[in-house]
Image (tube, rainbow, N blue to C red):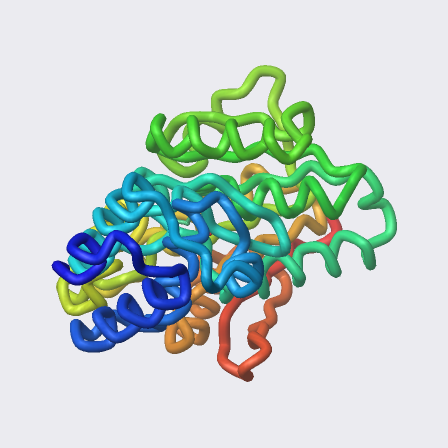
Amino acid sequence: MNAPASCPAWSIGELLQWTTDFFSRHGVEEPRLSAELLLGHVLDCSRLALYTRFERIPSPRQVAAFRELVQRRKERVPVAYLIGKAWFFSLELDVSPAVLIPRPETETLVEQAIRLVRNTTGWEAPEILDLGTGSGCIAIALAKNLPGARIVAVDISSSALDIARKNAQMLGVRDRVRWLEGDLCEPVQSLSPPVRFHLIVSNPPYIPADQVDALMPEVSRHEPRLALEAGPDGLAFYRRIATSAPGLLRPAGALLVETAFDQAVAVEAILLAAGHYDSSRIIRDDAGRERCVLVRLAAC
Ligand code: GLN
């Protein structure tokens, strides 16, 4: 990337145009959006504000910092990791390469969980468990939208939990989420006194091991493999959750999991085969794709 460095007098508008073309030439998706987010980050202003300052000339130091980010974006580092931020359910979250970048698809699970809690009599102060919390996006979005809820969130990665805790602190829900380090249900099973949940949610890893490398480079090279890979068929975590969740649920408790668009039927079968659940439902996202499976225990 020679042009912006050798032309330090480029305006914001010119930098955006040059970078958009550069990204397009290198096959970077959403080239204009990437350019705007990176330049906004360096100049510490919103994307909209870039357009009100189109003629302004950033300082040589700002251009150098931008240039560095553009280079890394060309190497397919996700924008979210470069700017350290992602947006989920109208919340701004910190992210780092220690956590999966929250996906818009996961908002379907959050919407469904909120609807279920609000529509269930007796769930005014629900205990909710989030398995594999990563950035904490699900746990925090639920805490923000369900003021009576108390949430336990688990992750096997201590560096992911550091990010999640920081997000909860920034978003003012620190007191309502308890963070536990460990493997799926294990740290919850050993809680004393025991906690039993009205609702367990999870967006577990669900990519078949041999397909991770075929994903777009942003994902395969930069997102944590731990958060993606799930055994030979991508269903390993659902099998474990199917058998371990019922012991942690209250009567009439619910388990809600996200799946890939083509896994919901298989996941529903796995959950029902565990033999504990009374009813099940597949939930579609706004685009009409199957996205979550909800199962419930009998009332008693
Ligand atoms: N629960 C987090 C999310 O939905 C992390 C999921 C994961 O790491 N598989 O983004």
Q: At x 81% / y 54%, what residue is drawn?
A: 118
**As drawn, which residue projects farthest toward the right?**
121
Q: In which quarter of the image is the N terminus?
A: bottom left
Is residue 14 toward the left or the right of residue 294 in the image? Answer: left
Residue 231 visible (yes or no): no
Q: Position of residue 3 (x, y in %)?
A: 17, 62
Residue 140 visible (yes or no): yes
- Relative to 157, does residue 205 appear above or below in the rendering? below
Is residue 38 toward the left or the right of residue 151 in the image? Answer: left
Is residue 121 toward the left or the right of residue 168 in the image? Answer: right
Q: Where is residue 127 in the image (x, y as percent from the top left)?
A: 69, 36
Q: Where is residue 214 in the image (x, y as percent from the top left)?
A: 15, 69
- Relative to 191, does residue 117 appear above or below in the rendering? below
Which corner quadrant of the image does residue 162 belong to?
top left
Q: Where is residue 44 in the image (x, y as percent from the top left)?
A: 48, 43
- Near-viewer residue (11 or 40): 11
**As drawn, which residue projects farthest toward the front?**
9
- Near-viewer residue (166 or 300): 166
How many numbered dots are placed on residues in this image? 0
Is residue 63 toward the left or the right of residue 270 in the image? Answer: left
- Relative to 67, does residue 149 appear above or below in the rendering? above
Q: At x 61% / y 48%, what residue is drawn?
A: 91
Q: At x 66% / y 46%, what residue is drawn?
A: 142
- Near-viewer residue (60 or 246): 60
- Near-viewer residue (64 or 251): 64
**As drawn, which residue projects farthest toward the bottom?**
288
Q: At x 24% / y 70%, what residue is drawn?
A: 23
